[in-house]
Amino acid sequence: MSDLTRLSAADLAGALTSGEVSSVEATQAHLDRIAAVDGPVHAFLHVSSEEALATARAVDEARARREPLHPLAGVPIAVKDVVVTRGLPTTAGSRILEGWVPPYDATLVTKIKAAGLPILGKTNMDEFAMGSSTEHSGYGNTHNPWDLERIPGGSGGGSAAAVAAFEAPLAIGTDTGGSIRQPAAVTGTVGVKPTYGSVSRYGLIALASSLDQAGPVTRTVLDAALLHELIAGHDPHDSTSLTDPVGDYAAQARRGLAGDVKGMRVGVVKELSGEGYQPGVLARFEESLDLLREAGAEVVEVSCPHFEYALAAYYLILPAEASSNLAKFDGMRYGLRVEPDDGPVTAERVMAATRGQGFGDEVKRRIILGTYALSAGYYDAYYGSAQKVRTLIQRDFAAAFEKADVLVSPTAPTTAFKLGEKLDDPLAMYLNDVATIPVNLAGVPGMSVPSGLSDDGLPVGFQVIAPAREDARLYRVAGAVEALLEARWGGPILAQAPELEVRK
Amino acid sequence: MSDTLVEYDDAVARYDTVFGIEVHVELGTRTKMFDAAEQGFGADPNTQVTPVSLGLPGALPAVNGTAVEYAIRIGLALNCSIAESCRFARKNYFYPDVPKNFQTSQYDEPIAHDGWVDVELEDGTVFRIEIERAHMEEDAGKNTHVGGATGRIHGALYSLVDYNRAGVPLVEIVTKPVAGAGARAPEVARAYVQTLRDMFRALGVSEARMERGNVRADVNVSLRPSSGSPLGTRTETKNVNSFRSVERAVRYEISRQAAVLDAGQAVVQETRHWHEDTGHTTSGRIKSDAEDYRYFPEPDLLPIVPDPAWVEQIRANLPELPAARRRRLQVEWGYADAEMRDVVNAGAVELIEATVAAGAGAAAARKWWMGELARTAKEQGVELEELPVTPRQIGALQRLVDEGRLTDKLARQVLEGVLAGEGDPEEVVVARGLEVVSDDGPLLAAIDDALAAQPDVVAKIRGGNLGPVGAIIGAVMKATRGQADAARVRELVLERVQS
């Protein structure tokens, strides 16, 4: 094997199964890659070499004993730092949790460990997943492997950059308004936000409980399907988790990869294009549509008139829930504890000092917004109205899915912007998620798959949206888009990415 | 600083009292409200916790189905409507004993609403209390303030938090404003809490031990010039945790508020603290609009939609409630109303029931518990059930009487031995040699001795004057140390003299 880090997870799993390579070799190759390139990329907040190699050894030994193994056993994975991992530091990108080592695993981590995937480490993110550029991390910026001067998207910039820079074949992200899909779009990777409730939220440090969902971050559609199957399923610890059996996503991905989209109705959401979208982004979107049409899909236009209120509703619901979810970070039980410089050391004053020092500006901004929105006298006007908009958006989706099997749009309106460019303009930052937010508000599944490079040579994402519980459709359509585009490009999009300078 | 008070009778003569009570009951489920952590009294601090009870990042709640069933039982027993669908909400406030800094509670959608319960006062008067709602929520942890003189937070050096109690399931029962009780308001308030305590136990939803804080009451009181006037400003006295204190707290607030109103001042809407030792309430925090809990529906939990068939099944399987049980037992036992009331007030219903089950007649059982034993308890200043004698022992004692083996007088001596820890009645009889002398032989010898000693008496009897027979019986009883059956002695004396 020339370079194990270039393999897809599916191919690496095949090589492991056949005995061509060992998990220790594969894991070490990725740890070496991290050591070589993560200095400038800074995708990881914590690298867990010893634990990863221990898991890899255990898998290799089990394989030698011919024990039954999960198909992905031995394939390394990176985990976003918002996911609680027993024994590994977990900060959610915030200084307020610096040094906290959780005593328990998130349900999806339990599944990953049970399946024998070595966890390479924890990836960088905007603090508490608030942001679209990973610039709000309490631990420094992550850089886009396509151009280190640019943002990797957010909040899950670390997971996307790690996968794009070949530091990991698989990663876990979380998506509250686009935090998996938008980073995927701007790094040329694949990201899936499953149906709300598909993957247990137990052990995800909550941002907005009614919107959060964990999902796969990968380089191929098939890899995303395999990882989704691994982490999905009902969890009694999460009351909002679905009881549905896990779908056969990999089979649907393979069907799509074989070009089978004939007769599928693909709805183009009128409101998710036009003004605010870069011409190069729109051009790549149209090309992908043409390919689907040529492959036999029926392309129709649908209208979702209430999407224009989605961003406003989102920025009431999210801060409201976040203001309550983040109340627990008070210096009383774990993480940072700051005592006031002068005056009495009372619980209230320690809480205030801890939160004042431990939270970054964006977090404080949203806590203040949310606290205000929930206040007596304002609740109906803000939180109540936002919930009504949410219902209207769900109805828009329901109507659109009468006319189409899946909906499509550009994932993000622009390619990766320069670090610092929008840091002082929250509204401009929020607009990055204009096309991804309606999906979270409705709880439906969405996916971003690479659709080429814009005029500036940076990756563009194609978003596929399916009805709730129909995640399988995402894999079929995105698989087709990937196969058709790669046939045109002559290889994966990341082959076009500039080589990162390797530290010897 | 002490409050100015108006003498109680004067206060209730000039003001109309309206009160309301919030009762919190800890449910006796094995695990917590939203969490697999076990719960129970007396565990070491912070040992009954999981990531959920500690509010660790990432942890999520999951509703305890048994707690929901218990809440529905309570709702049905209070004649409430059970909601077709209801939700939990978050009550947001920062306090170290609330690990998430919000309490998961029910706000605008309680599981049970609009009911009533009849409470019976000691004189038999029945007063109906309207129930506003009963809702589910989780308890907070327990703070211990160390280093201060008072055990309160002010002056403490540091505070410890025990999260064992955090997440314990609670049901909060809220009355509608209770008007019309007049001077008896304190008494009605006490009887209401007592009725609920008995009900929780009968329903099997809680041990309902006041001294362990299983049942806690917050008492709201307001006064108005007359029953036609609009409601006055109320105060809420928190954590009044014994029946007696409920009565005293209402009484105190009536006297205090009357004095405030008499002085032409306004009652301040506030939370007040109850002081068991002094029997006073003192001002706590001022309640105002500034207190904003920012309630919103708990997004981590689905609405609770109890299956109507399940609710009906719970209703059908509700155990007999205390009031109905008392009515049934009164009929079975044949007690007069006043007798039954005394039994209830003395807390003797269960004791008599068990004594009857042990074989005693209902009248005899009542005689023991309400007579000899009630006197003993009163002398010792303890509750009946705290006496060192069991209903089974009283049943056995009464059997000895019924079989003629003990006279009433002897039986009382045996009871004395039982209470002194000498064993079961049979054992005491043997040890003290107290059995009735039923063999005529020793009796006849004693009678003959007595007759020989009093020839004049024998002559009188033979002359047809039966009056002096008592003197002979007395002598025989004395000679047999009371172990003779007096009736039998009389028979034998007459036979002897007239033969």
Image (tube, coloured by chain):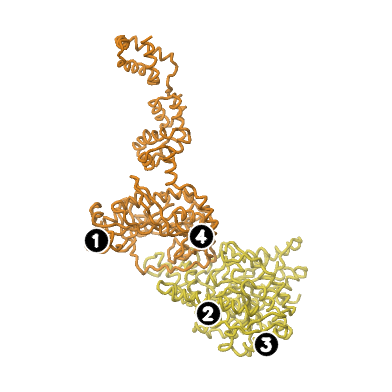
Chain colours: A yellow, B orange
Residue drawn at point x = 45 percent, y = 32 percent: B360
The crowding category of the residue bearing disc 1, from other C-alpha atoms within 10 Å (few below 14, some 14 to 19, many at least 20), is some
On the question of residue A60 being in view, the answer is yes
Q: Chain of mark 4?
A: B
Q: Amino acid at mark 1?
A: Leu
Q: According to the image, label 4 marks what residue?
A: B53
The crowding category of the residue bearing disc 4, from other C-alpha atoms within 10 Å (few below 14, some 14 to 19, many at least 20), is many
Q: Which type of secondary structure does the marked residue at label 3 adopt?
A: helix
Q: Chain of mark 3?
A: A
Select label 4 or label 1 by which is in front. 1
Q: Is residue B40 above or below residue B55?
A: above
- The image shows residue A419 at horizontal and vertical percentages of 55, 84
Image disc number at residue A287: 3
Q: Amino acid at mark 3?
A: Glu
The crowding category of the residue bearing disc 3, from other C-alpha atoms within 10 Å (few below 14, some 14 to 19, many at least 20), is some
Residues marked 3 and 1 touching at CB (< 8 Å): no
Q: Amino acid at mark 2?
A: Ala
Q: Disc 1 to disc 2, how far (Cα)?
A: 55 Å
Tell me which label, 4 or 1, sits earlier in the chain: 4
Q: Disc 2 to disc 3, how far (Cα)?
A: 27 Å
Q: According to the image, label 2 marks what residue?
A: A310
